[in-house]
Image: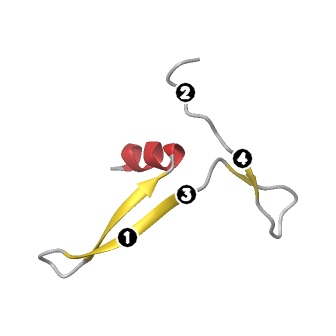
Amino acid sequence: MAGLAKIHPINLKGLWELGFALDEHTISSQFIGYDESGRERFQTERSVMEDLLYRSLG
């Protein structure tokens, strides 16, 4: 099925019976400096799943 993101399920341990994440979150993140407001800026490489979520919330 073209256009669908592949998932890489990860079992999560915790105080619940069963938990999963669909994929890793951030592949890498590099500090690149501060913006004009003094906020830290990062160059981030996201997994496909994280990028889809990030774009849907933006």
Question: Which quarter of the figure is the N terminus placed in?
Answer: top right
Q: Amino acid at mark 4?
A: Pro
For disc 3, the marked residue is 25
Camera-nearest residue between 27 and 49? 27
Q: CA distance from mark 4 to mark 1?
A: 25 Å
| Snapshot quadrant of residue 34 | bottom left
Task: Describe residue 29's horizontal placement relative to residue 2 as left or right.
Answer: left
Q: Amino acid at mark 2?
A: Leu
Ranked by sequence position, the earlier of labels 1 and 2 is 2
Q: Could you tell me residue 14's position as x and y percent?
A: 80, 69
Disc 3 crowd rating (10 Å Cα; few below 14, some 14-19, many 20+) is some
For disc 4, the marked residue is 9
Q: Amino acid at mark 1?
A: Gln
Residues at circles 4 and 1 in contact by the CB criterion of under 8 Å: no
Q: Dot 1: what SS?
A: strand
Ranked by sequence position, the earlier of labels 3 and 4 is 4
Q: Could you tell me residue 15's position as x and y percent?
A: 83, 70
Q: In this figure, which colouring scheme has been used for the structure?
A: secondary structure
Q: Amino acid at mark 3?
A: His
Q: CA distance from mark 1 to mark 2?
A: 28 Å
Residues at circles 3 and 1 in contact by the CB criterion of under 8 Å: no
Ranked by sequence position, the earlier of labels 4 and 2 is 2
Residue extending farthest bottom: 38
For disc 1, the marked residue is 30
Q: CA distance from mark 4 to mark 2?
A: 15 Å
Residue at horizontal 40 percent and vertical 43 percent from the top? 56
Q: Could you tell me residue 40's position as x and y percent?
A: 28, 77
Disc 2 crowd rating (10 Å Cα; few below 14, some 14-19, many 20+) is few
